[in-house]
Image (cartoon, rainbow, N blue to C red):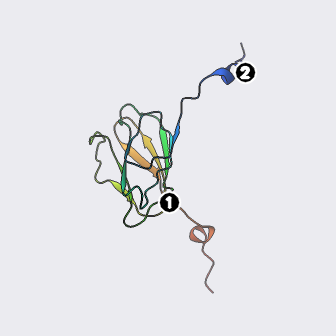
Amino acid sequence: MLEDKFAQHDKVIVDKFHDPEASYIMTVRDYVLRPKANAGTGPITITLPPVAEARGRFYSILVREADVVNSVTITDNNSDSECWTDDVVYYESCSPSLWYSDGLYWHMVGAFRFTWEDLFPKPQF
């Protein structure tokens, strides 16, 4: 029997979008975060969800505002991730990161911004 494609449209969307302007503890349903740290908010800390509960999920974080004084820090939940060595601190707006939980460890899958010239530099003759 074929799957009824239209049956999906009445389902409640489980993922949520947040743009915190204060320290925030993520839940397993907070897939997209756009934190802001500025003179009004001061530095903020984003705590990832419990690593075991987030197993198999990806979380996107893009810092909307940050600077040297007002940073955004990403940390694990009560040191529950294996081999978590240090928190990740962002001092720059538009800093991206993509996190993946394997149930025991948080993997920072992506955190870099490249231009075409960074990836494919012009040859020097």
Query: Residue 121: horizontal and vertical position, in percent?
Result: 60, 74
Q: Residue at x 42, y 65 (%)?
A: 67
Q: Which residue is mark 1?
A: 112
User: Image check: 123 left or right of 100?
Assistant: right
User: Image check: 113 left or right of 99?
Assistant: right
Q: Could you tell me which quadrant the C terminus lies in?
A: bottom right
* CA distance separating discs 2 and 1: 38 Å
Q: Is residue 17 visible?
A: yes
- Quarter where residue 123 is shown: bottom right
Q: Nearer the viewer, residue 117 or 20?
A: 20
Secondary element at tag 1: loop
Q: Could you tell me which quadrant the N terminus lies in?
A: top right
**Residue farthest to the front?**
40
Q: Residue at x 51, y 56 (%)?
A: 64
Query: Residue 54: horizontal and vertical position, in percent?
Result: 41, 34
User: Image check: 56 left or right of 23?
Assistant: right
User: Image check: 76 left or right of 125?
Assistant: left
Query: Residue 115: horizontal and vertical position, in percent?
Result: 59, 67
Residue 6's disc is 2
Q: Nearer the viewer, residue 9 or 124?
A: 9
Residue 26, placed above or below residue 90: above
Q: Is residue 47 visible?
A: no
Secondary element at tag 2: helix
Residue 66, placed above or below residue 78: below
Q: Amino acid at mark 1?
A: Phe
**Residue farthest to the top?**
1
Mark 1 is surrounded, within 10 Å at the Cα level, by few (under 14), some (14 to 19) or many (20 or more) other residues, namely: few
Q: Residue at x 72, y 22 (%)?
A: 5
Residue 61's disc is none
Residue 112, placed above or below residue 77: below
Residue 104, placed above or below residue 67: above
Query: Residue 36: horizontal and vertical position, in percent?
Result: 46, 54
